[in-house]
Amino acid sequence: MAELALANQYAKALLEVAQAAGGTAAAEAALDELTRFTEVFLSSRDLRTILLSPVVEHPQKVRVIERLCESIGASRPVRNFLNVVTKKRRLALLGHIRDRYQALLDEAENIVRAEVRTALPATEAQRQALESKLAEVTGGQVRCGYLVDDSLVGGLMVRIGSSVFDGSVRGHLEALRRRLVSGS
């Protein structure tokens, strides 16, 4: 639990720096840069070994971070942030920091994130209609991540935080089964 509180503090610090550097656009760009760095960091065992090792000197780690940041086009605030996190030996928390950063940014911008699972790929018109309806329901700007779920026969499922809205054929059939079994 202390790790999550620490990750939150680092995420807040980066958000403040990014917003001060260029407002919402810079904060969104920092999220993208942090996400790309985190994906590379988590997917490369060798990179994690080097950057997390207490044997590797900090200046060497800074050079590795600098090269990686160059390749992903990371801004100076994100580069500095990653160097500080590395120096403080908190890079192992990077995934949590990234998640908390996104949550804090979403909260600051009144953005609601939704995961949408569909049986078939959604058309652009369907996506716009769904996002418009979800914005009405949530009272905030909605950003959806779309996944095609082969286990769905038809329809869709939407997850916003811990709430799940099941509009799938399977969900409707399960609800019907429960009503028939309970005799209602």
Image: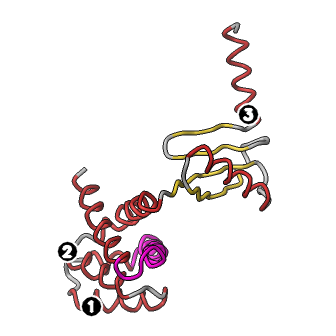
The structure residue drawn at horizontal position 73% and vertical position 43%, both measured from the top left corner, is 152
The structure residue drawn at horizontal position 35% and vertical position 89%, both measured from the top left corner, is 64
Q: Position of residue 142 (x, y in %)?
A: 58, 56
Q: Position of residue 184 (x, y in %)?
A: 70, 9
Q: Residue 35 lies in magenta, yes or no? A: yes
Q: Amino acid at mark 2?
A: Lys
**What span is in magenta?**
20-46
Which one is in front in this view, the residue at disc 1 or the one at disc 2? 2
Q: Label 2 belongs to which residue?
A: 88
Q: Label 1 belongs to which residue?
A: 60
Left or right placement of residue 140 versus residue 124 in this view = left
Q: Secondary structure at mark 3?
A: helix
The quadrant where residue 4 appears:
bottom left
Q: CA distance from mark 2 to mark 3?
A: 49 Å
Q: Secondary structure at mark 2?
A: loop
Q: Label 3 belongs to which residue?
A: 170
